[in-house]
Image (cartoon, grey):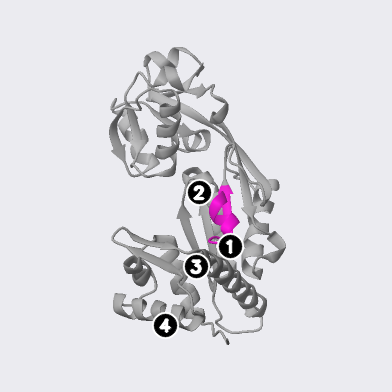
């Protein structure tokens, strides 16, 4: 039996699989739900097998669906590589880099590299998503992102990785706060106080919530804000204490705020750039990886403090 494959079907199926929903997959693919349902039905009829199991809770992949998803990602990755290889010969040809990173990498370590890269690569779009390090490693491993920046003790088995920079998490508090009597404290000591935090769902919020749960102690949040700048303003105002990376503290510190280091082993984090295979990246993704590695291997002044 001859099987016919379609690039649009590949992209649509990946979007459905990643959202576990025909509706959200259709939205991502800019298709109507009826058109999406019809394409999937025609795909399954053409292949002679069921790829999705439907239920009121959404959709799940069959064994055949998981195989189709794996190879759809490989095919689209190969097409991205072809696009990159041809880019220098074509006028106006655009490329895309899929990048996932945690909160600190996005706010502190990526901006200087991304800015310079996009100036020299005006036809490249970077699809950047904030994720937890474990989720990032999983996305790189299954091919749903090209590059990932992870930190901490995340398992990177099966991936290629390059260390970029190290950073320590710190506690900040208004001057005169009891925690500031010490230069170093454990996280469990800080949990007796109320915190100012980034919004629920941010990578660092989830990370600290899990760390508190591991200690069987509540992570009490008094105020949630949308940015690091707002965290510092709220701590200055006495709304609570906060945990921030040292790079953020060095950029935003003020005379009204003091700091102390966290002693927990997870508080010192090495950021790593990961890929399934650096040599297998598209030309523009490899250029971006090289730029990032070069910047933190030989940082140009003014370099961000680790």
User: Residue 139 colored magenta?
Assistant: yes
The kind of secondary structure element at disc 1 is: helix
Q: Indicate which disc, 3 or 1, sits on the residue closer to the N terminus.
A: 3
Vertical arrangement, residue 278 with respect to residue 153, above or below: below
Is residue 48 visible from the viewing direction of this image? yes
Q: Earlier in the sequence, mark 4 or mark 2?
A: 4
Mark 2 and mark 3: Cα distance apart in space: 21 Å
Q: Relative to the observer, which residue lies in front, 27 or 268? A: 27
Residue at left offset 67%, top offset 49%: 161
Q: Residue 77: percent from the left, percent from the top?
A: 60, 70
How far apart are the alpha carbons under marks 1 and 4?
42 Å
Answer whether residue 111 is visible to the viewer in this image: no
> Would you place residue 274 above or below residue 47 in this image?
above
- Whichever of labels 2 and 3 marks the residue nearer the N terminus, that label is 3
Label 3 to label 1: alpha-carbon separation: 37 Å
Residue located beneath label 2 in the image: 135
Q: Which residues are magenta?
A: 137-149
Separation of marks 1 and 2 at Cα, in angstroms: 25 Å
Label at residue 117:
1
In the rendered view, would you say 100 is above or below 76?
above
- Mark 2 surroundings: few (<14), some (14-19) or many (≥20) residues within 10 A: some
Q: Element type at marker 2?
A: helix
Q: Residue furthest bottom?
A: 2
**Quarter of the image holding residue 21?**
bottom left
Callouts 3 and 1 close, C-beta under 8 Å: no
User: Which quadrant: the N terminus?
Assistant: bottom right
């Amino acid at each position: 039996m001859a099987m016919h494959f379609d690039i649009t079907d590949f992209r649509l199926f990946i979007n459905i699989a990643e959202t576990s929903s025909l509706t959200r997959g259709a939205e991502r693919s800019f298709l109507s739900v009826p058109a999406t349902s019809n394409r999937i039905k025609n795909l399954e009829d053409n292949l002679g097998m069921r790829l999705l199991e439907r239920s009121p809770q959404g959709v799940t992949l069959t064994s055949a669906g998981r195989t189709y998803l794996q190879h759809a990602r490989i095919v689209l990755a190969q097409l991205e590589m072809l696009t990159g290889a041809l880019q220098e010969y074509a006028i106006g040809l655009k490329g895309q880099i899929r990048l996932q990173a945690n909160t600190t990498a996005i706010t502190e370590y990526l901006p200087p590299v991304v800015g310079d890269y996009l100036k020299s690569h005006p036809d490249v779009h970077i699809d950047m998503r904030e994720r937890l390090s474990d989720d990032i490693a999983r996305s790189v491993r299954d091919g749903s992102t090209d590059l990932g920046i992870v930190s901490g003790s995340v398992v990177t088995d099966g991936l290629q990785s390059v260390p970029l920079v190290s950073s320590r998490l710190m506690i900040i508090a208004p001057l005169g706060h009891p925690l500031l009597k010490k230069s170093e404290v454990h996280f469990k000591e800080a949990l007796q106080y109320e915190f100012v935090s980034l919004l629920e769902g941010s990578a660092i919020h989830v990370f600290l919530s899990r760390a508190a749960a591991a200690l069987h102690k509540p992570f009490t949040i008094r105020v949630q804000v949308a940015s690091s700048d707002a965290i510092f303003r709220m701590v200055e105002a006495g709304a609570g204490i906060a945990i921030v990376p040292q790079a953020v503290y060095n950029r935003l510190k003020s005379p009204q705020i003091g700091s102390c280091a966290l002693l927990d082993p997870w508080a010192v984090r090495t950021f790593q750039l990961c890929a399934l295979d650096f040599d297998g990246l598209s030309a523009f993704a490899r250029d971006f990886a090289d730029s990032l590695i070069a910047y933190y291997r030989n940082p140009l002044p003014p370099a961000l403090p680790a």
